[in-house]
Amino acid sequence: MRLAVISDIHSNLDALQSVLNDISKQSIDDIISLGDNIGYGPQPEEVIVYLKRYAVSSVLGNHELALLDKNYLRTFNPNARKALKINKNKLSDPAKRYISSLKPFLVRYGCRFVHGTPPDNIATYVFKEPDQKLISIMERLKQNITFVGHTHQLAVYELDQGRFEKKILIKLTVSLAKGAKYIINSGSIGQPRDGYNEAKYVIWDSVQDTIEPRFVAYDYHETIKKVKKAGIPKRYAELLEKATIE
């Protein structure tokens, strides 16, 4: 089994198309998205069309939640609210129905998939949780591997025989230890915040027991033009260029 796990597309069709092209060359059996398919970027409708076309299953991200829940939307900063409002106006009724159908988490292939923090938290950043809390969560999970997004940064959290370790994922394949438990952060396709402009995703190989981070170049300058044309706050255009760590 070779699974591509993508996350935080954020309405960036240019990045998504480049990633899907890369995925097509990797002998992938399935694709799962960790949510935040919309928000920040200029092409939410087109992104959802592509996810449907490629039969990509997705969980609910916090930007999808904000579109559905006005009270939660109020917790967003003004720039993020404005970007999401523009996104909402670009979405068709079928796209909105698709968003409303998304679940907080999925369990597939013996793995768990959630946007924020397992087991099913959509809005909490995993890196903000105390180590002991993450250890407790991982010990209780039935699944040995959980994939998360939300932070826009690639990372691996490993719990092996009581030893807990956090690692930043770079351009190297990581071997998974037998019997250990993992939280894998798959980075961001549409708005990386790790210092690298490329779109990011990961490949899980269940036979080789490996996680391979993929860094995919795309024309982010073209996306920047679209962001500005759509009237989305320029901050999100600047982040595409700088990939600023936050």
Image (cartoon, grey):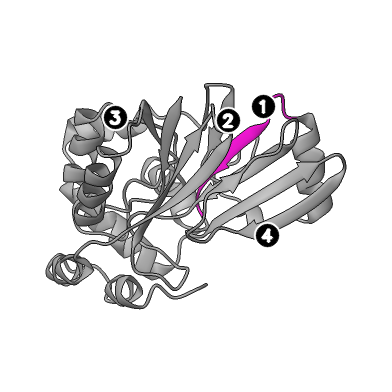
Percent across and percent down for residue 19 are 28, 48
Q: Main secondary structure of the magenta part?
A: loop
Magenta stretch: give its range: 141-150
Q: Residue, x 42% and y 48% (percent of image)?
A: 66
Disc on the earlier residue, 1 or 3: 3
First of labels 2, 1 by sequence position = 2
Q: Label 3 belongs to which residue?
A: 98
- Whether pointer 2 and pointer 1 mark residues with C-beta atoms closer than 8 Å, the reply is yes
Residue kind at label 3, given as amino acid type:
Tyr
Which is more foreground, mark 4 or mark 3? 4
Q: Are marks 3 and 2 in contact (CB under 8 Å)?
A: no
Q: Could you give the CA–CA distance between mark 2 and mark 1, rounded to whole angstroms? A: 6 Å
Q: Which mark is residue 75?
A: none
Q: Position of residue 189 (x, y in %)?
A: 35, 54
Q: Which residue type carries mark 1?
A: Gln
Residue 205 percent coordinates (x, y): 50, 33
